[in-house]
Amino acid sequence: MEEKVLEVLREVVYEVTGIDNLTMDTEFVNDLAFNSMDLANMVCAFEARCDKEIDIRDVKNMVQVKDVVRYIIDHGLMEAKD
């Protein structure tokens, strides 16, 4: 499931920013120089793609890609497909 979520996250980040070099340890601000607008656009794009909402208060805790992947899995924002 983590790999599927990571792949979708990579696609969303690429669509929003043109950045395609994400690993689980990538930090959005320190490694990718994301600002608050980049983060908001990424959240909106992911919500639109998965037709789910992310509590904006939780975004501040999403520092690394693995934080987002874990949040998505823990909150059932993507359905597992075999």
Image (tube, helix red, strand yellow):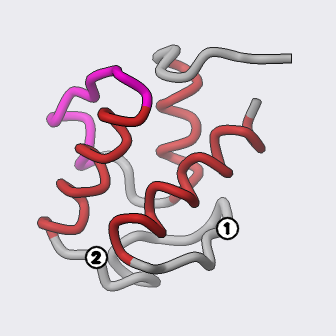
Image height of 11 relative to 70, above or below = below
Label 1 environment density (alpha carbons within 10 Å; few <14, some 14–19, many ≥20): few
Q: Residue at x 22, y 68 (%)?
A: 38
Viewport quadrant of the N terminus:
top right
Q: Is residue 15 magenta?
A: no
Read off the magenta span.
50-60
Residue at 48% in and 79% down = 19
Q: Would you place residue 19 above or below residue 76 in this image?
A: below
Amino acid found under the numbered disc labelled 2:
Phe
Identify the residue under disc 2. Answer: 34
Q: Tell me, yes or no, whether the two marked residues, 2 and 1, touch with CB atoms within 8 Å.
A: no
Name the side, left or right, on which 73 lies relative to 39: right
Q: Where on the picture, by quarter, is residue 47?
A: top left
Residue 65 in the image, given as x and y percentages of width and height = 53, 57
Nearest the viewer among 46 and 34 is 46
Residue at the spot 39% in from the left edge and 59% down from the top edge: 63
Residue lying at the far right in this picture: please name it. Answer: 82
**Above or below — where is 56 with respect to 51?**
below
Q: Kindly identify which residue carries mark 1.
A: 23
Looking at numbered disc 1 in the image, what kind of residue is underneath it? Thr
Q: CA distance from mark 2 to mark 1?
A: 15 Å
Quadrant in the rendering for residue 24 = bottom right
